[in-house]
Image (cartoon, helix red, strand yellow):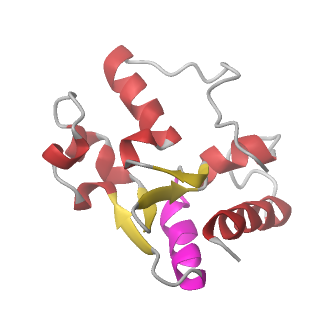
Amino acid sequence: MNITEAINALVKKLLADAEPGQYDIDNITIDNIRYYINCGYCEEFAGTIVKQIEGAEAYWGDNFDADFWGVDIEDWVVDHAAYHCFIVYKGRYYDSEAPEGVDHPKDLPLYQKKQEFAKTGKWNWQDENFYAKVAS
């Protein structure tokens, strides 16, 4: 099993095992569970994948300094990057919303949302593009 397959399989398992209200939403779907995993379950999720995929490692955003991030937002590392755990594997970055991986963690959907919030001060929770649209 490759890392993308492992991530998608774990997302589907968590969806199947979800208890009512567990993710603070009434209608949990394959699209939105990926976001909710990243909001409080990311460390557990990353840890499970790391145990399955040899060579994968889990990192918190603040394991990297401001120069690495290259994001022009004051206190990015402390206020935004620090609060997410993601997977590094073969030079790519993964989480529940990015099973195919991205070239830099700032490209992970959760960090894209955090950058938007930091720049505009708002997230449109009703926007259909808010939740990552990824292969299920």
Q: How many callouts does the rendering have?
A: 0
User: Considering depth in this image, is 4 or 26 the residue closer to the camera?
Assistant: 4
**Where residue 47 appears, x then y in whole percent?**
51, 75
Residue at point 68%, 70% (across, down): 6
Judged left or right of residue 78, residue 85 is right
Q: Is residue 55 above or below residue 3?
A: below
Residue at point 25%, 56% (across, down): 62
User: Considering depth in this image, is 121 or 56 the residue closer to the camera?
Assistant: 56
**Where residue 68 appears, x then y in whole percent?**
20, 48
Quadrant (top left/top right/bottom left/bottom right) for the N terminus: bottom right
**Where residue 82 appears, x then y in whole percent?**
30, 52
**Where residue 57 appears, x then y in whole percent?**
41, 74
Image quadrant assignment for residue 4: bottom right
User: Considering depth in this image, is 52 or 116 the residue closer to the camera?
Assistant: 52
Image quadrant assignment for residue 126: top right
Residue at point 60%, 82% (across, down): 52
Whether residue 92 appears in magenta in the rendering, the answer is no
Residue at point 14%, 45% (across, down): 67
Judged left or right of residue 111, residue 67 is left
Q: Which residues are magenta?
A: 40-52
